[in-house]
Image: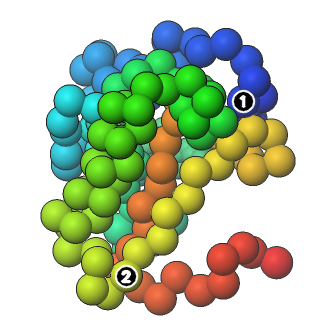
Amino acid sequence: MPIDATLPYDPDNIFARILRGEIPSKRVYEDAHAIAFHDINPQAPHHILVIPRGPYVSWDDFSANASEAEIAGFVRAVGAVAREAGFVEPGYRLLANTGMDSGQEVPHLHVHIFAGARLGPMLAR
Ligand code: AMP
């Protein structure tokens, strides 16, 4: 079910539980500001999710309320994950669903990284 990105942060959402290590994930990266792990239902040959450590519901919440250090750290982490995975030269795509119309399902900001094939048109039609 898509979520309303204006709701308050739910500390028991599934990505908060992954951050706390309460449920398993295939973690590929972590630093002071972010962690990254494989999406459980990949939509491309490579599909990684990057999430900030801070409690932000969505891109809207994060861009409005996170500190400069959190924003810089998260953006750098997304780049580092893609670089370390070898995605830069063949190319990759970033996606951050935000709110109902986007279909966002998990109410903790996550950036999807897709790679490993020609990814086709930006949106399904
Ligand atoms: P979104 O629709 O943008 O909110 O994306 C949520 C993503 O989280 C989907 O691609 C799911 O496959 C993924 N997902 C849900 N639960 C897990 C989990 N436990 N571990 C890894 N990825 C998950």
Point out the tag, 2 or 1, that comes first from the N-terminus.
Answer: 1
The residue to which callout 1 is attached is: 5
The residue to which callout 2 is attached is: 91
Q: In the image, is residue 113 above or below residue 40?
A: below
Residue 92 left/right relative to 80: right
Q: Please, what is the three-letter code of the amino acid marked with disc 2?
A: Gly
Q: CA distance from mark 2 to mark 1?
A: 29 Å
Q: Quadrant of residue 37?
A: top left
The residue at the point 41 percent across, 38 percent down is: 71
The percent coordinates of residue 28 (x first, y second) are: 20, 49
User: Within 10 Å of the Cα at label 1, are there few (<14), some (14-19), or many (20+) other Cα atoms?
Assistant: many
Q: In the image, is residue 103 above or below residue 51?
A: below
Q: Please, what is the three-letter code of the amino acid marked with disc 1?
A: Ala
Q: In the image, is residue 24 above or below residue 122?
A: above
The percent coordinates of residue 81 (x first, y second) are: 25, 57
Q: Quadrant of the N terminus?
A: top right
SS for callout 1: loop
Residue at the extreme front: 68
The percent coordinates of residue 33 (x first, y second) are: 28, 32
The residue at the point 19 percent across, 45 percent down is: 29
Q: Quadrant of residue 17?
A: top left
SS for callout 2: loop
Q: Quadrant of residue 98?
A: top right
